[in-house]
């Protein structure tokens, strides 16, 4: 594993610690069961067009590869096809860059047909850019799809055409998947349940948090990219509202552009979510830089600006910190000038009540609140309110009926008014005061 990282003077926007980046790169290699026999961090002053690294360092690594009998060398950077080919000759070993390594992981982890298609599309886009003067024989690898070229066609042109034909087929299949997802979303809107999506850097604890909130059995391991295929489960919020929680693929620095493009259909679940939980690993030494990487991808997806109001930061793994640092983070959370983050431990369950209350608070924005009275005999009406809305307050009247304060989704408001003509809209200021009291109460189990 070679980590060529720019020196301070040569860095262009890199704020990450070189050792942390190298540790992450080693984790990527081990994520596909590679046996890492050596790792080298290289201080890079400038990039050489032919070999990326300087001549002396290339020779030094060649000796190390020979000594360790390494059959594969991974470079934690993006190599051009020419650089990759020259390094393979110099080191007498297979060489893959960061993009190739991430694609290998995605190829191994994809479980659903959709995931496999998305990964294959990204891999073909990458492979197409790697076509240099070599024989790839894709028609043998793929079982003979497409047509062979005419008499004057070179092998590279044949390979490129075969790749492009396969890519068109995959894009066609993915378009069908996109339409199916659209139909599923339409059905969910008819129910309707709000969607809360988890995003974050890979291995930040999203799947562990997902399992904690839903009691599901989604794969959650201390491993990069443990989750690739999106998962949806239903959860209930404190006042009884049902929401769909979505676990998504983790992000990483220098995530290949073709992967973002290929997974766009999957990431639409995030783009259309009512609330986005940005899960951060506060125990990681590079957690601030990781957050910047996630935010840049969210910006690329168009989720900055107005969309930021939907994003709630979740500071996870508080249990892994020393008490002094944990206390300092809680103070920082309270002093936050933007939206107050939720400090939690998905592993132990600390802070879950506060997190659910914050989700409920965000979803309440724009939801009308009604006051109404029901007689003791109107059990079906009470059941409907509990099933389709949030009963914020309930007081028993002298004659056995109930006085209720109910919050409802905008799509259900007209239906509520038809069923309960006696319902009166609660003024926003009154509702806000009530919610403020609830937030103060629940804040005691949150970041204190």
Image: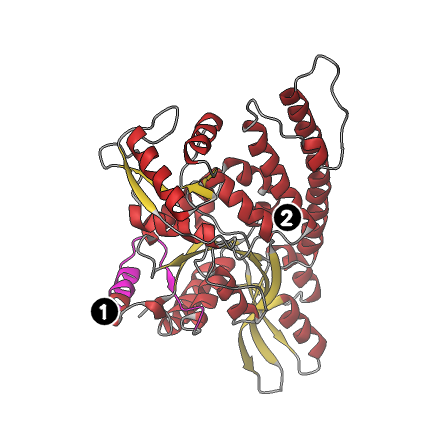
Which disc, if any, is residue 324?
Answer: 1
What is the spatial separation of the Cα atoms under label 2 and label 1, in whole angstroms?
A: 42 Å
Q: Are marks 2 and 1 in contact (CB under 8 Å)?
A: no
Whole-percent x and y of residue 132?
A: 55, 24
Task: Name above or below for residue 216 compared with residue 144.
Answer: below
Q: Nearer the viewer, residue 252 or 328?
A: 252
Mark 1: give few (<14), some (14-19) or many (20+) Cα within 10 Å: few
Residue 241 seen in the current view: no
Name the residue at 64% across, 70% down.
385
Mark 2 or 1, closer to the camera: 2
Name the residue at 58% across, 25% down.
134
Q: Nearer the viewer, residue 287 or 106?
A: 106
State the colouring used for the structure image. secondary structure
Name the residue at 58% across, 87% down.
398
Q: Which residue is mark 2?
A: 115
Indicate the quadrant containing the C terminus: top left, top right, bottom left or bottom right: bottom left
Whole-percent x and y of residue 242?
A: 60, 66
Q: Which residues are magenta?
A: 327-347
Whole-percent x and y of residue 344?
A: 40, 67
Name the residue at 76% across, 28% down.
146
Residue 176, by quadrant, is top right
Which disc, if any, is residue 437?
Answer: none
Helix or strand or loop: what does disc 2 sit on? helix
Q: Nearer the viewer, residue 258 or 351?
A: 258
- As for residue 105 lying within the magenta part, the answer is no
Helix or strand or loop: what does disc 1 sit on? helix
């Amino acid at each position: 594993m070679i980590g060529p990282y720019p020196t301070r003077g040569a860095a262009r926007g890199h704020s990450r610690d070189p050792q942390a980046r190298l540790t992450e790169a080693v984790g990527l290699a081990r994520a596909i069961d590679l046996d890492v026999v050596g790792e080298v961090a290289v201080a890079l002053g400038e990039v050489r067009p032919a070999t990326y690294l300087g001549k002396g360092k290339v020779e030094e690594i060649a000796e190390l590869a020979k000594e360790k009998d390494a059959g594969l060398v991974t470079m934690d950077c993006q190599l051009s096809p020419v650089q990759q080919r020259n390094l393979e000759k110099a080191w007498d070993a297979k060489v893959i860059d960061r993009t190739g390594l991430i694609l290998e992981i995605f190829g191994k982890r994809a479980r659903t047909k959709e995931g496999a298609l998305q990964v294959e599309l990204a891999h073909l886009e990458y492979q197409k850019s790697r076509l240099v003067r070599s024989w790839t024989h894709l028609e043998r690898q793929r079982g003979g799809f497409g047509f062979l070229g005419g008499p004057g066609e070179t092998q590279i042109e044949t390979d490129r055409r075969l790749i492009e034909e396969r890519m068109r087929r995959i894009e066609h299949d993915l378009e069908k998947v996109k339409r199916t997802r659209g139909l599923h979303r339409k059905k969910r809107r008819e129910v309707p349940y709000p969607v809360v999506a988890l995003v974050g850097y890979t291995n930040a604890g999203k799947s562990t948090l997902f399992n904690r909130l839903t009691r599901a059995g989604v794969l959650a391991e201390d491993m990069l990219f443990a989750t690739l295929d999106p998962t949806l489960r239903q959860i209930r919020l404190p006042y009884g509202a049902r929401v769909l929680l979505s676990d998504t693929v983790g992000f990483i620095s220098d995530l290949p552009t073709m992967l973002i493009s290929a997974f766009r259909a999957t990431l639409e679940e995030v783009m259309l979510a009512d609330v986005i939980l940005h899960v951060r690993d506060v125990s990681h030494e590079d957690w601030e830089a990781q957050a910047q990487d996630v935010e840049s991808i969210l910006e690329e997806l168009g989720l900055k600006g107005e969309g930021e109001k939907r994003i709630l930061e979740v500071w996870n793994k508080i249990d892994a910190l020393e008490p002094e640092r944990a206390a300092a983070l809680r103070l920082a959370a309270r002093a936050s000038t933007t939206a107050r983050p939720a400090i939690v431990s998905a592993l132990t369950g600390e802070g879950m009540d506060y997190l659910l209350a914050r989700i409920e608070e965000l979803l309440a924005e724009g939801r009308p609140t009604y006051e109404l009275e029901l007689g003791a005999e109107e059990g079906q009406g009470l059941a409907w309110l509990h099933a389709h809305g949030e009963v914020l307050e309930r007081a028993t009247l002298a004659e056995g009926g109930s006085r209720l304060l109910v919050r409802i989704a905008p799509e259900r408001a007209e239906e509520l008014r038809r069923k309960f003509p006696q319902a009166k809209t609660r003024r926003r200021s009154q509702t806000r005061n009530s919610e403020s009291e609830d937030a103060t109460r629940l804040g005691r189990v949150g970041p204190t």
